[in-house]
Amino acid sequence: MVKIGLEIHCQLTKLKSKLFCSCKADYREFEPNMNICPICSGIPGSLPLLNQNAVEKATTIAMALNCEIPEKIAFFRKNYFYPDLPKNFQITQLNAYGDTSIGSRGKISINNKEIRIRRIQLEEDPGRLIYEGATERTKITLVDYNRAGTPLVEIVTEPDFENPGEVRIFLNVLSDLLENLGVSDPGLEGAMRADANVSIEGGVKVEIKNIGSFHDLEKAVHFEITRQQSLHERKIEIIQETRHWDDRRKITVSSRSKEEEGEYRYFLESDIPWVNIRSDTKDQLKTTMPENISSKKERYISKYNIAPQVADILASDKYYSELFEKSHSENDAKDIANLITTDLMGLVDTREKRDSSKLLATHLSELVDAIAKKRITRTSAKDILQDMIKTGNSLSVILEKSDLNQISNHDELSKIISDVLLNEENAANEARLKPETINFLVGKVMQKTKGKADPIITLEILKEKLGI
Ligand SMILES: [Zn+2]
């Protein structure tokens, strides 16, 4: 039996400042070592000041993951020497005096299976080491402390996963949940990182560290299960150890472990007092918490009669659900939902495309309205969407420029269809005998009008002219 547990590190990227100082939490825009101060670079004598918003965001995560939240939380020093850690200790949390981490004993369900959350803690991110060249052969390692002190939430699960597929589903559900809460942007480089521990057949636990992306986490877990099973079959002992994920070779490799948990010599961070999490603060956070994904999905289905698969896509993606919420009215909700999940999805499927998109919610309502009033065809809607994303122009401006107005004028269409029938004499004769072949002629009319002909009126006129 395979058992997998996860430790997920999620940066609170939506915060303005770091966890204990006023440097920016968004360190990515800076030149190396330009987003630092005496506190986050560990100058002796500097004192940390706890970011209250970070405590609130972490509490919100703990609530969303159904954790128990203690009345008081504490911070601890985790001592270890490593160049990315300017103070030589990390300020983190520990359940040493009862529950003093921000959350304990939570749960979340994925595909009708419950995954237990052991604990959630709030801590600071270390800096970044940048290796010049390949890791093994590098002569120079550079240190950038811009990230040091960034607020991080660590989510530790119980070993409740039995295969890499469950891990993948959990990570998807979790990153949607964190994005929906407005606490983190999982798409940002380094915003979500994870370690995993894997054991088979009740054997020892092997930890895998250094996994840079969720995509690689599934691969690393898969590799580790196969490695352990192969050792087990050959009756070779599996050693309890820490292994690193080699991103380039896509394998796990044994690494001399840093300190064991007991060697970190944790002690209470006396520069930060214990923090009360008052019940009225919790109540207030609960009322201002965004609607969760599953109730959003239920609401879309019951209120607007949207298909469950469509509602699922809309509800779990914050970008789509925000567009939907802003653009729909009571009457066009279903059409807008379909427009987003059929036409828009392929056009804004990456972070870069979304960032550069000039599409507004009003564009979607204009489009759905124009399709309903037969001003444009369903086929040209996608081209128009593409234009809106690129230019941000309104529908009327685009129609004026590109002549995409639907041709539904009877006389105009009748003339075009007569021309088509003259050129396609054989097909016309065939359609008279076998009416089901008429679609070929409809296609020809569409071709001639570049998709602008109203398909229903076209079919009517064709039948009339062919006498069928
Ligand atoms: Zn700072």
Image (cartoon, grey):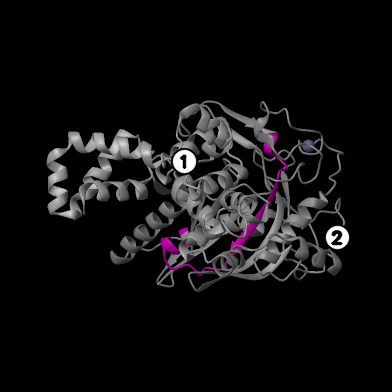
Q: Quadrant of the N terminus?
A: bottom left
Q: Name the residue under label 1.
A: 347
Residue 301 in percent (x, y) is at 54, 67
153 or 392: which is nearer to us? 392
Residue at mark 2: C-beta within 8 A of ligand 1: no
- Magenta highlight range: 146-168
* Depicted 188 relative to depicted 265: above or below: above
147 sits to left or right of 225: right
Residue 412 in percent (x, y) is at 37, 36
52 or 409: which is nearer to us? 409
Residue 90 in percent (x, y) is at 72, 48
* Depicted 443 relative to depicted 341: above or below: above
Q: Quick one: label 1 or label 2, which is nearer the N terminus?
A: 2
451 sits to left or right of 3: left
The residue under the point 43% across, 39% down is 406
Q: Looking at numbered disc 1 in the image, what kind of residue is underneath it?
A: Leu
Residue 120 in percent (x, y) is at 67, 61
288 or 114: which is nearer to us? 288
Tell me which corner region of the image, top left, top right, bottom left or bottom right, holds residue 415.
top left
Q: Looking at numbered disc 2 in the image, what kind of residue is underneath it?
A: Trp
- Secondary structure category for the residue under label 1: loop
Q: In the image, which disc is placed on residue 274?
A: 2
* Depicted 279 relative to depicted 132: above or below: below
- Secondary structure category for the residue under label 2: loop
